[in-house]
Amino acid sequence: MAANDSAGSSGAKRNDRQAVLTWAATIAACAYFAWMGASLSYSTSMFMKMFESMGVDLALSTKIVIGSFHWLYPILFGGASALVIAKQFFVRDKWPNLGVTLAVVVGVDIASRVIVSALYAPLFDLIEKLNK
């Protein structure tokens, strides 16, 4: 009976460690989403002011980002946070849980880079025109 109790308690300790690890990864991911959302929101408003003062013709992707960032960023970054928190309650195994967190972080990172590229597109076009 004592051997059974010690095997059960080591399994419980392992589950506790796994839960701590997956929650730590989830909290880190949510902190990254909050930081990225706040910095992109601030940057987008700065780009808006700059483009207004320059009177530059904006690319379609830039117009879409500037026109929708007030609702797009909360959906993107808040949705990603909600997803990684919700998966904590449905995905119990450590590796699939961490895999989902990593996949969401990579997806948000790719989306953030696309947004940054859209914001810089008019500047790159302007530089290209000036170099000719």
Image: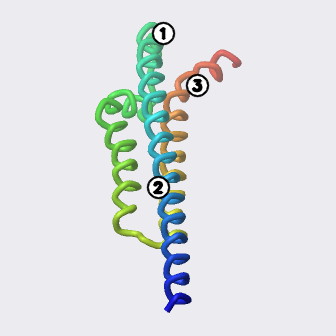
Quarter of the image with the C terminus is top right
Query: Mark 3 or 2, which is nearer the eye?
Result: 2
Residue type at tag 1: Met
Write the residue at 37% across / 44% down.
Answer: 76
User: In this figure, which residue is indicated by the disc labeled 1?
Assistant: 54
* Rendered residue at 65%/15% (across/down): 130
Q: Circle 2 — which element?
A: helix
Q: CA distance from mark 3 to mark 1?
A: 13 Å
- The amino acid type, in three-letter code, at marker 2 is Trp
Mark 3 / mark 2, whichever is N-terminal: 2
Which residue is most to the right?
A: 131
Q: Residues within 10 Å of mark 3 (few under 14, many from 20)?
A: some
Residue bearing mark 2? 23
Please give the label number shown on residue 125.
Answer: 3
Q: Name the spot of residue 43 as percent of width and height, x first.
A: 48, 23
Q: Position of residue 105 (x, y in %)?
A: 51, 51
In front here: 30 or 58?
30
| 3D distance between C-alphas at marks 1 and 2 | 46 Å
Q: Residue furthest front?
A: 2
> What's the residue type where badge 3 is placed?
Asp
Residue 10 locus on image (x, y percent)? 55, 76
Marks 3 and 1, the one that precedes in the sequence: 1
Label 1 CA crowd tier, 10 Å (few <14, some 14–19, many 20+): few
